[in-house]
Amino acid sequence: MTPETAAWVTSPDAAPLLAQAMAAPPTDELAVQTRLRRVGHAAEQVAAVLAVVAARRRGRAKFGASADRMFFTPDGLEQATRPELAARHTARFIAADVGWVADLGCGIGSDARSLAAAGLAVLGVEADPVTAAFARANLSPWDDARVVTGRAQEVPLPGEATGRHTGGVGVWVDPGRRVRGVADSRGRSRRVFALEEIEPSWEQVCRWAEQVPATGAKLSPSFPHGRIPAGAEAQWSSWLGEVLECAIWWGPLASAAGRTAAVCRPDGRGGGSEVVVTEAEAAVGSAATQPAVRRPADLGSWLWEADKAVVRAGLTGALVGRELAPGVGLSTGDAAADLPWARRYAVLDAMPARPKVVRAWLRARDVGSLTLKKRGASLDPLQFRHDVGKLEGSSEATLLLTTLGAAVTAIALG
Ligand SMILES: C[S@@+](CC[C@H](N)C(=O)[O-])C[C@H]1O[C@@H](n2cnc3c(N)ncnc32)[C@H](O)[C@@H]1O
């Protein structure tokens, strides 16, 4: 899409066409396209309307009904912060009494919308002109939010733009993790994983943090522990069990220097919707102070599986019981304690993770349906399942493949 078409599709001129196209069922896309072309709309404009509508439909999974009023590029939607996590970012700025935030590399503006909706003034800066046009449209409900197209490095900070706002100045950076110009069939570009490849660069992010103490940045969950800046907080956050980000918080935005994990479970599993685990808890946890299990005979009645945010943050020492292997996120013990960020299973049995042994165990128990989990073992579960062979029984079993001492072990869980 060209920037001109992006400006048109976000303008009031395109609104009736978008409404028409949104009202048609997805299966009628061709009919909508033919109808719009027949009444004289340019091919580029019709394509833009259909692309916006298709992206809104995909966007509902992340943004719910709000997606139907938003604009997304394929990369913009994928990279956009989940609104629930954006609300957590916003809460940090509010708690630090920040009233004006520069969102440097604002994408389609998910974080910026959250800040603006909470009453903060926002300046979004976005290098890609189409994405910037979409962010502008997505932020249009808020008078105190504006978006400029350009490179964030060229925007003066904290700057004259603070205007009448008396609250403190903050910076939010969510660097792009994409390779420009290498797109798949849906228009999404290839992801990058190394800290050296993000844009704006990590060095630039750190420079902004020096300039503006209330700086926050969203980075990949693979952020290396050794790169956490002195005095800053690195918080790994998971949403329904998937680790979505590692956010670095400087200055007044940090609540505890070092590593923390935020486990967000709106499904209520574990008894709460959100729980934070800190380095202080991990240092004194039972798993941190007891030796790891080495043999199946050491397994207790229970097995705990930590949320992956806690594992990524390196805080598995906060687990109860003894760890199966340091840092893997599994522990075992006999006291039936519950942790809001770990799942507890009953340990039913344990055996060497050899297909022949496991097959015999499953057949003896009439198992026809097998759930295989894997943590801390270099073994391909699909190949393992294939090697176990056909199961024809009527009962179900869950086996965890993991390493105890040096042996890959299958633990039957209930
Ligand atoms: C991960 S996305 C931001 C997503 C956003 N936080 C949201 O929730 O919607 C990063 C964005 O930064 C933009 N970007 C990358 N380098 C930039 C730069 N130097 N200046 C301004 N924008 C930049 C990219 O085009 C991309 O849209």
Image (cartoon, rainbow, N blue to C red):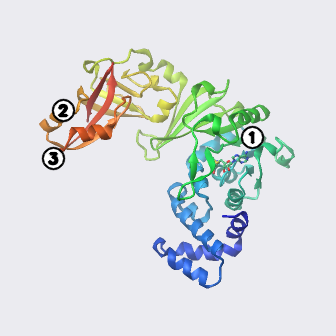
| Distance (Cα) linking label 3 and label 2 | 20 Å
Name the residue rendered at 45%, 73% in the picture. 27
Amino acid at the residue labelled 2? Lys
Residue carrying label 3: 394
Secondary structure beneath label 2: helix
- Which quadrant is home to the N terminus? bottom right
Instruction: Name the mark on residue 356.
Output: 2
- Which quadrant is home to the C terminus? top left
Q: Is residue 287 above or below residue 410?
A: above
Residue carrying label 1: 170
Amino acid at the residue labelled 3? Ser
Q: Nearer the viewer, residue 301 or 44?
A: 44
| Distance (Cα) linking label 1 and label 3 | 59 Å
| Distance (Cα) linking label 1 and label 2 | 60 Å
Q: Whole-percent x and y of residue 40?
A: 65, 83
Asked whether disc 1 touches disc 2, contact meaning CB atoms under 8 Å apart, the reply is no
Q: Nearer the viewer, residue 88 or 151?
A: 151
Number of on-image labels: 3
